[in-house]
Amino acid sequence: MHLLATPFNIDNSYYLQMDSTMLKKLVLGTALFAAPLFAFAESEVNVYSSRQEQLIKPLLDKFTASSGIKVNLVTGKDDALIERLKLEGKNSPADILLTADAGRLYRTKDLGLSQAIESETLKAAIPENLRDPENQWFGLTYRARPIFYVKEKIKPIDLSTYADLADPKWKGKICVRSSDNIYNQSMLASMIASQGPEAATQWAEGFVKNLARPPEGGDRDQLKAAAAGICDLAIANTYYYGQMLAGDVAEEKAAAEKVAIFWPDQGEQARGTHINVSGATVTKAAKNKDNAVKLLEYLVGDEAQAWYAEHNQEYPVKTTVSASSLLKAWGDFKADSINLSELGKHNAQAVKIMDTVGWK
Amino acid sequence: MLLCMALLTALPILAVFAYIFIPSAEVWQHLVATVLTDYLLNTLYLSLGVGLGVLLLGVPLAWLCSMCEFPGRAWFEWSLLLPLAMPAYIIAYTYTGMLDFTGPVQTSLRSLTGWGYGDYWFPNIRSLAGAMLMLALVLFPYVYLLARAAFLEQSICVLEVSRTLGCNQWQSFFRVALPLARPAIITGLALALMETLADFGTVQYFGVTTFTTGIFRTWYGLGDHAAASQLAALLMSFVFILLLLEQASRRRARYYHSSSKYAQIKRIQLTGWQATGAVVFCNLTLLLGFIVPVTQLASWSLANWRTQLDSSFIILIQHSLGLAIAAAIFALLLALILGYGKRLHPGPLVSVAARLASMGYAIPGTVIAIGVLIPFAWLDTQLNHLSQTVFNTKLGLILSGSLFILLFAYNVRFLAVSLQTVEAGLGKIKPTLDNAGRSLGLSSSAVLWKLHMPLMQGSLLTAVLLVFVDVLKELPTTLILRPFNFNTLAVRTYELASDERLAEAGLPALMIVATGIIPVVLLSRSISRSRAGGSTV
């Protein structure tokens, strides 16, 4: 191992960057007899995160500053991190898995990779439908996936529900990204949960026929396409819209200003607008469970919740913390109240339906 | 021993294969009924398109730059390698940024003409054709590089003889030089095609459904590992058969140069429209494959560098460089051992093992990463069990949680590059030389060190630098397998781009390209000098 590491000797700070237990383990591996010399007393917590470094690192740094607990971070794609967690088994160094989608948290629990956490702080801060019924995972922020319409062309009075988007009157008027994307899979999974697979299939069939173009690009691209005249309606997550409006890219801002949010399914009997969370779970293999719980509790604290709202344009899960002024300006809405575990349960079926109806 | 090494490298691939015996008929029925035809056809078209593209760009450019003389030739000779430093997913980002309906090109077109959506036709960059173009533009240097090296290494006598036998300059190209360079060209083509099959970033970004995207969708979306592995296995078998066919097709032919008499190449002087055509062709390729995307990256960086350039940025560069250097050396050593071993002990078993070990190049990085994790995580568990019982202490994940696993994975992924290059180099050395060396009392390893290595310096350097650039650009394996607090330029680029912040991804992307240029320039210069008959021999 030491041989392999030589190229990095260019700068010793590399070793400072590498987390110290790992280095100790390396030394340990080569010199077993020295094992008792090392104590693993340093206070730290290891995080696997599918939230990007830049979206989470500032908060983790604040946590370290206030608690003295060092946070070690690996970022990556959720599915791959779950796979890594699974293969590492009980030796996994990870204490916490952070993801940007509830379905993945469900899967982690389903695979037996997470553990229940009894914390009054977490329970008090997070509404019931945004956390696991058995306290195996917790939502930290939420975002909605509403309908966006081009202000010049569409009157909000003509819009009503997601179901209505399958009506032939919208033929060639809707933009949405690829069904490879988890946000679309979760959206369809929520329909399967509330209306059953047949209704969801029928809806998807009609919806796909109404697309203005084969799905391409990400959520921002759908909003830009709507603003540029390719379609009249688009589906996207709220924080993308928020970041376009609040960001400093002039074209994105101009595009976002041409569209507005419509909150679908708001009626008395309706299920509400589809939402999803970014959340976290404590791994079964966690060696620093106490620190992990401290980090989670920090993340639902007032300071962290306000930071999320302000910087990422996401909704805080904690109802006493107010959303950013931008988010408030979009108005209140009724969110779908199903427990988000349902999204994970119906994910595979959602993908099958998408394949069947030809949603690329 | 040799077999063991090859098998060890092939272990992750075999680990994925192990899933194929788990039945998953229901998912297969679903796949066949819905999307499988799309996966197959798109993959086929993409491979054909990219294959044709890299040949039509790579071979003529190599011939022009090595055998002809025209204004700017010396500059094009090395600069045409630059697209090699451009990861395919990054060139895809830049062209999409420019040519999309909402990008600057179409927007200004609309404001100039007053057209709206649907009033005019504009090629959609996010399409199968777009993906072919993007991949061909950055992958053609493989063919160019190897073909040029082959042209330069050809004994001029062969060409002269062909001329005395009545061939004109162009006939001697088609009838002598081209067939002689065939193994090199095919190797380049094989590398480009394998890279195409493994590509995930570009096709996914463009929304083209191929085998690779299908494997992901089946694995994660449908949650069926067995069916996903079976898809991967199908893809691998396809590549394996291709590689064997290629090998079989040249079994009877040998490509040694029987004369080692080299003379300075008398380049064909191009004039008039021929020279103009050559200059335009070279310029256009360079412009589209490198200058245009780099300009786009630079303009993004210019707008965003303040938020991106911090102290951690230097560490990103160090990590990227360090990993690439270590992996390149590792891969060269392995390729030398395997390549030379194959030469010493030729046999179908070793040959198949070596082919199997180099399959990794055509397999998506994420699949490799999982394949590597399976055996190493198991080994770690055993080691921990052992240390727990013997020393009563836990080691933790000393293999799968360290950089070691990442370097190993790079080797699985990129061994094909170093192995093919080393084999091509060895293939040009006549076996009589080995015999002469051995009869003069050298051991077989001394033959390698004292005779072969100096003779194929160029090939060795090519092997190191190609792997270096590949690792620098590599994303999915790095993303999954890296240890805590260890980021690279590619990871940073991906994170920003996947959050749809393309403009902010400009600076790290530009740094990948800039870092990749250095080895590319070195490579180019060494090959120019490698021509026998030059000052060095």
Image (spheres, rainbow, N blue to C red):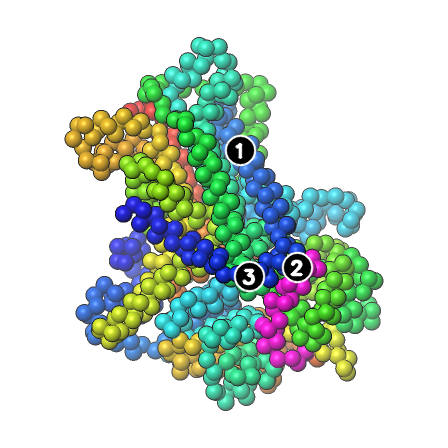
Instruction: Residue under label 1, please give it.
Output: B55
> Residue sitting at 41 percent across and 13 percent down?
B161
Q: Is residue B502 above or below residue B197?
A: below
Q: Which mark is residue B24?
A: 3
Q: Which mark is residue A355?
A: 2
Q: Is residue B134 left or right of residue B116?
A: left
Q: Tell me if mark 2 has few (under 14), some (14-19) or many (20+) residues whose alpha carbon lies within 10 angstroms of its own.
A: some
Residues marked 1 and 2 touching at CB (< 8 Å) = no
Q: Quick one: SS at disc 3?
A: loop
Q: Is residue A354 left or right of residue B375?
A: right
Task: Tell which subunit mark 3 falls on.
Answer: B
Residues marked 3 and 2 touching at CB (< 8 Å) = no
Q: Amino acid at mark 2?
A: Asp
Q: Amino acid at mark 1?
A: Leu
> Residue sitting at 35 percent across and 29 percent down?
B428
Quadrant assignment for the C terminus of chain B: top left
